[in-house]
Image: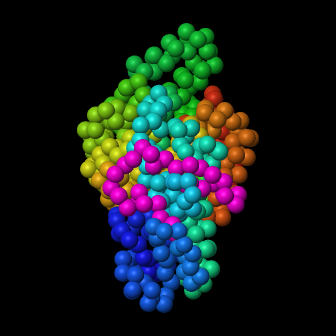
């Protein structure tokens, strides 16, 4: 595929390779109109002037894709065209698939001044794509499939290999155990709390678990591993090893039972660090927590997911890169299911301020357990129906449908009663 463009920039190169993600074969760029006109193979023009050609596709260019700046006015309008949600960057300009894919994948809108939630996170309601509740469809994947089909009408010999949709399970271990292995002070404090609430049932259950006569409900590790092995679902664990705080309530990295869990799981499955809440204000903590995990697992740590999904562009990703992280799984919404980056496919992060593609690979997720229950207020049955619908919609474009779960949400304890079935029903879909 030969592409003619007036300006060959890092942004445009990145956009082209992401739009043609599934194309088998090479992509070349040229600014030589004579070479382009004489070329007899598959080709495309990215033009400053709107025009049509009978022999090859032409995309009317959104010119800001050629510069290095970040502008507030580059917020596109969202419109429905032929039943599809599309972005338009200027009145009268047709849909520019390259600009649209670039704008969503790079999270351009998150570099702009916008409101944040109580944890400083970018919420789904602030996204341009939230205006018509479009977040629950992977629009980047839809746009590039539609455009690939259009290009093949000109050049049927082109081959696009689009993978089928596959589930991937990721589990955050925020609180390794409900009652066991928490030390004398925390155990006694929990017992006094039960007494103050006159919760005799919970007090007796706590005692039985602490003395070992009952299984700790948060210890769902073997169950998760067994199910994922049986269903052949890829599984990745993220371990919280931050110093204790109000938000980082996990147990100590020195705890022998927690260390045993980490050693066992990291020896078989992919795993990564779950940088604590406080690491966002003290970047040095990431290196400390990462080294703790490496010491326990005896393996290098190259994956991460931020605790509370706290993510600031571009600072968070730069810090992770500096500390040897090569894959991150944070990109998703806490307040709603859907596609923060519009895709089910991993992709390299593009640093907008530096105007360059990086080696950090982002794995976006589409659904989180606490989102379904706490933010969307869905019952277990409604949650199953909702996620089944999302998966059905995503099958047309394929990819890696990442689920974010927690070990405690499979405990059938307290507010999580009934949610083990949700997980089982979702993971039945292949």
Q: Is residue 395 visible?
A: yes
Foreground of the two, 185 or 428? 428
- Residue at left 41%, top 72%? 5
In the depicted structure, whether residue 178 falls above or below residue 89: above
Foreground of the two, 180 or 309? 309
Foreground of the two, 161 or 400? 161
In the depicted structure, whether residue 39 falls above or below residue 218: below
- Reply yes or no: does residue 68 show up in magenta: yes
Q: How many marks overall?
A: 0
- Residue at left 55%, top 45%? 128
Indicate the position of residue 238 as horizontal and vertical percent values. 43, 46
Visual colour scheme: rainbow
Say which quadrant the C terminus sits in.
bottom right
Picture quadrant of residue 258: top left
- Reply yes or no: does residue 94 show up in magenta: no
- Residue at left 70%, top 39%? 380
Indicate the position of residue 88 as horizontal and vertical percent values. 55, 55
Indicate the position of residue 39 as horizontal and vertical percent values. 45, 88
In the depicted structure, whether residue 43 falls above or below residue 412: below
- Residue at left 61%, top 15%? 199
Q: Is residue 358 visible?
A: no
Left or right, 261 with reference to 336: left
Left or right, 403 with reference to 422: left
Foreground of the two, 29 or 220? 29
- Magenta residue span: 59-88
Left or right, 307 with reference to 136: left
Indicate the position of residue 122 as horizontal and vertical percent values. 47, 38
């Amino acid at each position: 595929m030969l592409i003619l463009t007036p300006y060959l920039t890092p942004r445009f190169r990145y956009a082209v390779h992401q739009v043609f993600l599934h194309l088998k074969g090479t992509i070349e760029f040229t600014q030589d109109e004579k070479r382009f006109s004489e070329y007899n193979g598959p080709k495309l023009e990215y033009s400053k002037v709107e025009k049509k050609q009978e022999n090859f596709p032409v995309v009317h260019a959104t010119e800001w894709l050629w510069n290095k700046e970040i502008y507030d006015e580059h917020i596109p309008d969202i419109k429905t065209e032929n039943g599809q949600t599309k972005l338009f960057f200027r009145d009268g300009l047709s849909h520019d698939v390259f600009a649209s894919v670039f704008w969503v994948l790079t999270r351009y809108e998150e570099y702009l001044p916008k409101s944040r939630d109580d944890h400083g996170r970018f919420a789904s309601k602030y996204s341009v794509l939230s205006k018509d509740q479009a977040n629950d469809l992977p629009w980047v994947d839809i746009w590039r499939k539609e455009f690939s089909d259009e290009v093949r009408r000109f050049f049927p010999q082109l081959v696009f290999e689009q993978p089928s949709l596959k589930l991937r399970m990721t589990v955050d271990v925020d609180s390794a155990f409900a009652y066991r292995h928490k030390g004398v002070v925390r155990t006694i404090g929990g017992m006094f709390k039960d007494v103050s609430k006159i919760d005799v049932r919970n007090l007796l259950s706590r005692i039985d678990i602490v003395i070992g006569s009952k299984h700790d409900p948060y210890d769902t590790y073997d169950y998760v591993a067994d199910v994922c092995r049986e269903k052949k679902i890829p599984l990745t664990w993220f371990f919280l090893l931050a110093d204790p705080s109000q938000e980082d309530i996990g147990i100590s990295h020195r705890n022998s039972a927690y260390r045993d869990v980490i050693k066992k799981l990291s020896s078989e499955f992919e795993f990564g660090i779950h940088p604590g809440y406080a690491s966002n204000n003290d970047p040095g903590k990431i290196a400390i927590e990462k080294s703790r995990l490496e010491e326990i697992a005896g393996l290098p740590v190259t994956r991460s997911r931020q605790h509370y999904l706290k993510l600031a562009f571009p600072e968070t990703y730069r810090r992770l890169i500096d500390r040897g992280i090569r894959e991150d799984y944070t990109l998703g919404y806490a307040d709603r299911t859907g596609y923060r980056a519009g895709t089910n496919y991993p992709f390299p992060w593009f640093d907008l301020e530096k105007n360059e593609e990086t080696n950090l690979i982002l794995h976006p997720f589409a659904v989180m357990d606490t989102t379904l229950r706490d933010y969307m207020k869905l019952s277990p049955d409604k949650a199953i129906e909702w996620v089944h619908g999302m998966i059905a919609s995503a099958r047309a474009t394929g990819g890696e449908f990442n689920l974010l779960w927690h070990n405690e949400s499979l405990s059938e304890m307290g507010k999580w009663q009934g949610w083990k079935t949700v997980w089982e029903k979702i993971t039945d879909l292949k």
